[in-house]
Amino acid sequence: PKNSIELEKRLHVIGRLKYLERLGFIQKAGSITWKVDGTFLKSLRQIQISNDIIKRKANHINNISDKHLPIVRTFLRKGESIAGRVVGFGLHDENYDKRYLILEGIDGKIHYVHPTKKMILHRDSSKIKNNDIIHMEVKSYFKNGKETTYLKFNNWGKLDRIKWNKEITEADHYFITRYLKNLKALDMNLDTRTFGRQYFNMMKQRIVRFRTLGHLDKNLNVKNLIKRRE
């Protein structure tokens, strides 16, 4: 380098290259030369997306009951589902008007998901509001021998709406089949102040009441005494 400024710039670049080498994105090829891995740009993009998601979680942090819950970018596949409380919506990619939805899941995770156009319309028309409990599931159907998958969602309303509903609801069926029958509810280790723990405690109380009233048998199957509400 001809002067101290150029030397400082070169040392800065070398420092960054050594950092990327430690991360495994590039490989040392010589004393001051490196070889770029073929997946470098893709990996760098994933890191950028992860950092953006963490920042967006921070934007909604006041609406999350437990600020230490992990945030995950969730892509649902056929047969998979999640349920949770709406924390907030936002813009994922302004170039394509792609939105994101953050759900505080009843599974103890913060889910970063991409809502469907129908969900966005419901949000824009205030049919989906913060604190509403949303259920999302990927379903499929066959037509002309071809299988098509789609994302179905249900808005179960606020926690109190489920709590005081005297009928067995879609939320009850989901809780029974996904958690109680699979014993997943017993593995939950959430703080009593979190939404997830409040939800589980509420649902357990509902199940006990329905069993006492005779609406559920010992295997937690509905006895068809109450019409199921979708």
Image: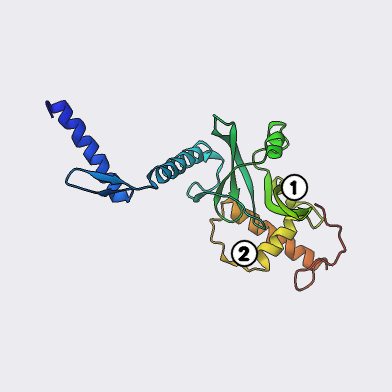
Which residue occupies the foreground of this view, 141 or 54? 141
Residue beneath the point at 86% across and 57% down: 227
Secondary structure of the residue carrying numbered label 2 = helix
Task: Give the residue number, with chain letter if any, for mark 2.
Answer: 185
Residue type pointed to by label 1: Arg
Which residue occupies the foreground of this view, 131 or 91? 91
Instruction: Please report whichever mark, 2 or 1, sits nearer to the chain's N-terminal start.
Output: 1
Q: Is residue 90 left or right of residue 25?
A: right
Residue 88 - label = none
Which of the 4 quarters of the picture holds residue 183? bottom right
Residue beneath the point at 32% across and 51% down: 24
Above/below status of 211 relative to 121: below
Residue beneath the point at 58% across and 48% down: 104
Residue 161 - label = 1
Place of residue 70 in the rendered image (x, y in percent of width and height, measured from the top left): 49, 51
Marks 2/1 in contact by CB < 8 Å: the verdict is no
Q: Is residue 27 left or right of residue 93?
A: left
